[in-house]
């Protein structure tokens, strides 16, 4: 049985922090994420995962959807914490984290449908909360221009 997972969406200026690694032997990128440990809240888990995987502390801005959070890391510089390998059930089998890097919101071709799905949730939540950070317009442009 798989444990619940959390994800951190980190956007600094005009770029999104993503983990790079293998999922089922294919190189992919993904939000910093991990399993919720026993006795841990989702909020505690997402902050712990940031410390473990990116060597940064974060402040939760808000919950985007499910256990996915918008996180502010200020001016810290993320550095790969460790190379991780997770053995979950089929959905997350053979998942490794090998690097972390920022990808510009202007680089539409570097994002996948699943990324944009979360960006749409994020854009709607920002609008609902009247929260318009410096990157908001670039996020909207990515959503509007993705795969056009």
Image (spheres, rainbow, N blue to C red):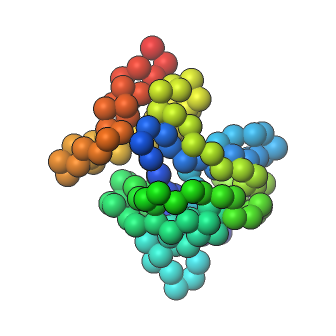
Give how far across and how far down residue 114 sits, in percent. Answer: 52, 38
Name above or below for residue 14 compared with residue 77. Answer: above
For the view shown, which residue lies furthest in the top direction? 148
Q: Specify the quadrant of the image occupied by residue 143.
A: top left
Name above or below for residue 78 compared with residue 45. Answer: above
Name above or below for residue 72 compared with residue 144. Answer: below
Give how far across and how far down residue 40 sits, in percent. Answer: 50, 81
Frontmost residue, 94 versus 126? 126
Q: Specify the quadrant of the image occupied by residue 62.
A: bottom left
Give how far across and how far down residue 119 sits, in percent. Answer: 41, 40
Observer able to see residue 48: yes
| Residue sitting at x 45%, y 23% | 146
Question: In the displayed structure, does residue 25 sit left or right of residue 5?
Answer: right
Question: In the displayed structure, does residue 87 sit left or right of residue 57?
Answer: right
Give how far across and how far down residue 66 sits, in percent. Answer: 41, 58
For the view shown, which residue lies furthest in the right direction? 25
| Residue sitting at x 68%, y 54% | 92
Observer able to see residue 69: no
Q: How many marks?
A: 0
Q: Quadrant of the N terminus?
A: bottom right
| Residue sitting at x 20%, y 51% | 129
| Residue sitting at x 45%, y 47% | 12
Q: Quadrant of the C terminus?
A: top left
For the view shown, which residue lies furthest in the front direction? 75
Name above or below for residue 91 compared with residue 81. Answer: above
Question: In the displayed structure, does residue 34 sit left or right of residue 14?
Answer: right
């Amino acid at each position: 049985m798989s444990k619940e997972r959390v994800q951190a969406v980190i956007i600094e200026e005009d770029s999104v922090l993503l983990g790079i690694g293998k999922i089922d032997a294919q190189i992919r990128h993904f939000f910093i994420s991990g399993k919720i440990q026993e006795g841990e809240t989702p909020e505690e888990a997402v902050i712990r995962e940031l410390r473990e995987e990116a060597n940064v502390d974060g402040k939760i801005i808000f919950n985007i959807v499910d256990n996915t959070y918008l996180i502010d890391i200020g001016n810290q510089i993320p550095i790969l914490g460790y190379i991780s390998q997770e053995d979950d059930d089929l959905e997350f089998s053979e998942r490794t984290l090998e690097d972390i890097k920022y990808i510009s919101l202007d680089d539409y071709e570097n994002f996948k449908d699943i990324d944009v799905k979360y960006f749409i949730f994020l854009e709607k939540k920002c609008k609902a909360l009247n929260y318009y950070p410096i990157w908001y317009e670039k996020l909207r442009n990515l959503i509007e221009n993705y795969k056009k």
